[in-house]
Image (spheres, grey):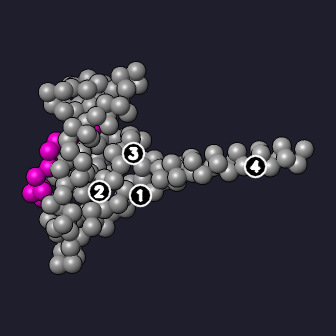
């Protein structure tokens, strides 16, 4: 009886050690790209709270950095509320093909995702919905390191970035 109890406890501990990192990582915020020592203090958007992996609800390529974040509701010039999806811009040191393969593996057609190869975009719906920004989507493109939201970022990291990922999601 005691041996059976110990075996069960051991199994539970092994399962917890395997799955706990996955559960914990989903509640962590996405890390902002590190800034260089001489970066200005007032980079727009850096004061905003970064979303968590769970809030986005779309798999994120491992090891990405957040470069820009736009909450779901914003206002237009007249102060009216514009309803749109929240958007995060991420960068990765992985090449574009590797990132694309990750999303092909994780965003399944059976779950409503469509991949539009010519545009390098995954859409939960059709392409017209994506253009109107009314459905979740993931766009992937090569990153040259010259994007506006990389100004002030750590130079060594920027020089190693190969791919930019844009994710539109419903918070």
Q: Which residue is mark 1?
A: 29
Q: Earlier in the sequence, mark 2 or mark 3?
A: 3
Contact (Cβ within 8 Å) of mark 4 with mark 3 = no
How many numbered marks appear? 4
Q: Position of residue 120 (x, y in %)?
A: 19, 33
Q: Which residue is mark 3?
A: 56
- Which of discs 4 and 1 lies nearer the camera? The answer is 4
Image: 140 above or below 125: below
- Which of discs 4 and 2 lies nearer the camera? The answer is 4
Magenta run includes residue 142:
yes
Residue pushed farthest bottom? 38
Q: Earlier in the sequence, mark 4 or mark 3?
A: 4
Find the distance from the CA under tag 1 to the CA under tag 3. 10 Å
Find the distance from the CA under tag 2 to the CA under tag 3. 14 Å
Out of 126 and 37, give the one closest to the viewer. 37
Q: Earlier in the sequence, mark 4 or mark 2?
A: 4
Q: Residues within 10 Å of mark 3 (few under 14, many from 20)?
A: many
Contact (Cβ within 8 Å) of mark 4 with mark 2 = no
Image check: 75 left or right of 11? left
- Which of discs 2 and 3 lies nearer the camera? The answer is 2
Out of 56 and 101, give the one closest to the viewer. 101
Q: Quadrant of the C terminus?
A: top left
Magenta run includes residue 160:
no
- Which of discs 4 and 3 lies nearer the camera? The answer is 4
Contact (Cβ within 8 Å) of mark 4 with mark 1 = no
Q: Which mark is residue 9?
A: 4
């Amino acid at each position: 009886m005691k041996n059976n109890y110990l075996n069960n406890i051991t199994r539970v501990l092994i399962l917890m050690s395997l799955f706990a990192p996955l559960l914990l990582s989903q509640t962590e915020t996405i890390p902002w790209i590190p800034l260089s020592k001489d970066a200005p203090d007032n980079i727009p958007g850096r004061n905003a709270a970064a979303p968590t992996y769970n809030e986005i609800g779309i798999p994120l390529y491992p090891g990405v950095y957040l470069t820009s974040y736009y909450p779901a509701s914003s206002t237009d010039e007249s102060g009216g509320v514009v309803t749109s999806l929240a958007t995060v811009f991420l960068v990765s040191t992985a090449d574009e093909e590797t990132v694309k393969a990750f999303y092909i593996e994780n965003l399944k057609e059976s779950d409503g995702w469509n991949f539009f190869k010519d545009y390098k975009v995954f859409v939960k719906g059709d392409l017209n919905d994506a253009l109107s920004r009314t459905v979740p989507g993931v766009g992937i493109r090569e990153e040259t390191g010259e994007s506006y939201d990389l100004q002030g970022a750590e130079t060594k990291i920027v020089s190693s970035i190969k791919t930019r990922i844009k994710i539109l999601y419903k918070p």
